[in-house]
Image (cartoon, rainbow, N blue to C red):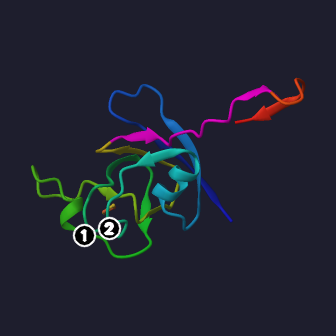
Amino acid sequence: MRKYRIQIFGEGDDHPQILDCEEGEVITDAAERAGILIRVTCANGGCGACRAEVVEGMVGYTGPVSRKKRVDPATGNLKYELLCRATPLSDVVVRPLNGWKQKKQKVWAEIRPNPISGGGTTCQ
Ligand code: FES
């Protein structure tokens, strides 16, 4: 299966987050797999929470999306893509309007000396 490179820029980011997205996979799913959360509310192309500017490249859609949420209100022209249903058709560079954040990392249990045997370790 073909993979495309996705570059994600947030507000004020000098360097993008870079991840791979498989052909037919939606960009928000690929981002989450890579530990990057893009805001998703409806996940069906209806609300616009995942709206992004595609700076480079092309995307297609895995299902219907709201045309209204893709329009730039200032010009009335299509300007945005909805990443919850967008799948890359090439390498793409995107700038989500609501930015992105790192998925919270799980904290590993602290390893302490075993209080019963006095040796070894125990996990708590
Ligand atoms: S999350 Fe609602 S349109 Fe993408």
Q: Position of residue 123 (x, y in %)?
A: 75, 36
Q: Which residues are magenta?
A: 99-114
Which residue has dot 1 on it? 66
Q: If the image is split into quadrants, where does the C terminus sit?
A: top right
Cβ–Cβ under 8 Å for marks 1 and 2: yes
Instruction: Give me the disc on residue 123.
Output: none
Residue drawn where x is 22% and y is 68% of the image: 67
Give whichever of discs 1 and 2 has the lower sequence position: 2
Residue 103 in the figure: left or right of residue 3: left
Q: Is mark 2 within 8 Å of ligand 1?
A: yes
- Residue 109 higher or lower than 87, as above or below: above
Residue 111 located left or right of residue 7? right
**Residue 59 on the magenta span:** no
For ligand 1, tell me if the residue under mark 1 lies within 8 Å: yes
Q: Amino acid at mark 2?
A: Gly
Q: Residue 104's spot in the image, x, y percent?
A: 51, 40
Which of the two residues, 115 or 23, is positioned nearer the viewer here? 115
